[in-house]
Image: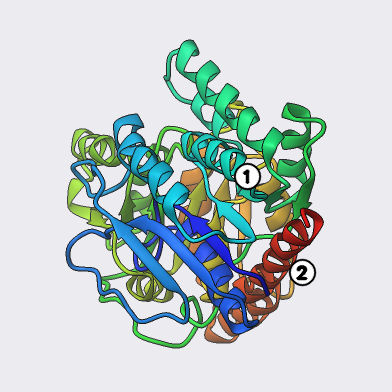
């Protein structure tokens, strides 16, 4: 393996799908004999930084009130220093960068100056995600321009499924796009391990809850659920722009006592919440040109052996439909509608998966969504980009 630099505002131990994906790539790279330098941010207080077989350089960054690196000012507080850091770093053979598109554009500029190939790891389409929110049209246009700028100049664009690959090729027809898949760390998200404390049957939503997820649908459906299952609990574990709205909505609907919001926790704690849950819930609001995404939180639940309810359309619903009935353990997909969601949750609580069914689900998940296999394919693609530039 050749020398590489990885640029990302999020990295382990900070819990996020990007962090897990990139840490797996860096470890795979190092174990293959390559040297990798990671340019990232200092994690929030309370997270433990462990030793790694690769070097990590951390920089302070502006964080939102919930500790996340979110919003354009936060992005710029990382992007501007990383431009100088990348220009001053020892010369690598290849650079890998994660969105947002502002970071992709900065890396494209630095690599252009230094005549370096780079890979753009686009797990989703950021400009489509921006369009799905209330962002002004001018902001969406700028995000799309920056995203196209980065992908046009990348030696390779890595992505997670065929649907997103097709969308990226629509935006930049000449881009070289490779599908490496998506997955989770199945050594952490596994059926065995600690279990969070629960009182009664628990429904768990883990990860980001923002406008395009539409996680409010679960709170809206909750009154109908507890009418049939008074001891049930709805637990959100994570963060996101919708966090305040979820609490406000639960109080307005009179179900605040049975709805819990737990701020972002390390991956092993998220896995503990999933293992203890009767049902994991995942949503993606339809009609926002974003139905090609496959949420990592869905894969994490299945790898833990926890049946999942997917609310929405597109790739996520197709993924659930493709599961062998013998291993689905009650996992299903329903339309994004309050009554359908409420009925599906109530049914799952009434007919919980058995221990044997959950074990079969976890075994299927371990073979289908291993992050180690994804990291291997990503490393090969990045190495190919470096070789092609020689």
Where residue 326 sits: x, y (%)? 73, 75
Q: Nearer the viewer, mark 1 or mark 2?
A: 1
Q: Is residue 270 left or right of residue 1?
A: left
Q: Secondary structure at mark 2?
A: loop
Q: Which residue is mark 2?
A: 324
- State if disc 2 and disc 1 touch (CB < 8 Å): no
Quadrant of the rendering where the N terminus is positioned: bottom right
Asked if residue 349 shows in the view, the reply is: no
Q: Secondary structure at mark 1?
A: loop
Q: Which residue is mark 1?
A: 293
Where residue 270 sits: x, y (%)? 37, 68
Where residue 171 sits: x, y (%)? 72, 28
Q: Residues within 10 Å of mark 2 (few under 14, many from 20)?
A: few
Residue 98 - label? none
Could you say which is closer to the camera, residue 107 or residue 209?
107
Q: Is residue 301 left or right of residue 373?
A: left
Asked if residue 143 shows in the view, the reply is: yes
Please identify the quarter of the rendering in which residue 244 is found: top left
């Amino acid at each position: 393996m050749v020398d590489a630099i990885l640029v990302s505002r999020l990295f382990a131990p900070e819990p996020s799908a990007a962090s897990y994906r990139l840490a797996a790539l860096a470890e795979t790279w190092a174990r293959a004999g390559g040297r990798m330098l990671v340019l990232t941010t200092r994690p929030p207080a309370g997270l433990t930084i462990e030793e790694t077989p690769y070097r990590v350089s951390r920089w302070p960054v502006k964080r939102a009130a919930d500790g996340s690196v979110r919003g354009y000012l936060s992005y710029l507080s990382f992007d501007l220093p990383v431009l100088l850091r990348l220009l001053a770093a020892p010369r690598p053979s290849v650079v890998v960068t994660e969105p947002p598109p502002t970071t992709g554009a900065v890396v494209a500029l630095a690599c252009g100056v230094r005549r370096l190939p780079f890979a753009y790891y686009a797990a989703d389409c950021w400009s489509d995600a921006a369009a799905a929110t209330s962002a002004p049209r001018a902001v969406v246009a700028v995000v799309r321009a920056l995203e196209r700028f980065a992908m046009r100049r990348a030696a390779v664009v890595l992505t997670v499924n065929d649907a997103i690959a097709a969308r990226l090729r629509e935006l930049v027809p000449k881009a070289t796009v490779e599908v490496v898949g998506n997955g989770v760390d199945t050594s952490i998200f596994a059926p065995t391990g600690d279990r969070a404390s629960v009182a009664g049957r628990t429904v768990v939503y883990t990860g980001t809850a923002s406008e395009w997820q539409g996680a409010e649908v679960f709170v809206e459906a909750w009154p109908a659920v507890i009418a049939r299952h008074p001891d049930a609990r709805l637990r959100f574990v994570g963060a996101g722009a919708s966090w305040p709205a979820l609490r406000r909505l639960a109080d307005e609907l009179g179900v605040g006592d049975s709805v819990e919001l737990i701020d972002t926790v390390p991956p092993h704690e998220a896995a503990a919440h999933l293992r203890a849950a009767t049902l994991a819930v995942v949503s993606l609001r339809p009609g926002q040109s974003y139905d090609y995404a496959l949420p990592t939180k869905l894969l994490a639940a299945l790898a833990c052996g926890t049946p999942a309810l997917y609310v929405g359309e597109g790739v996520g619903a197709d993924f659930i439909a493709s599961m062998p009935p013998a291993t689905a353990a009650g996992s299903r997909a329903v339309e994004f509608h309050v009554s359908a969601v409420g009925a599906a949750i109530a049914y799952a609580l009434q007919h919980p998966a058995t221990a044997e069914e959950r074990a079969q689900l976890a075994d299927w998940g371990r073979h289908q969504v291993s992050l180690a296999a994804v990291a291997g394919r990503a490393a090969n693609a990045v190495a190919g980009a470096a070789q092609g530039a020689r």
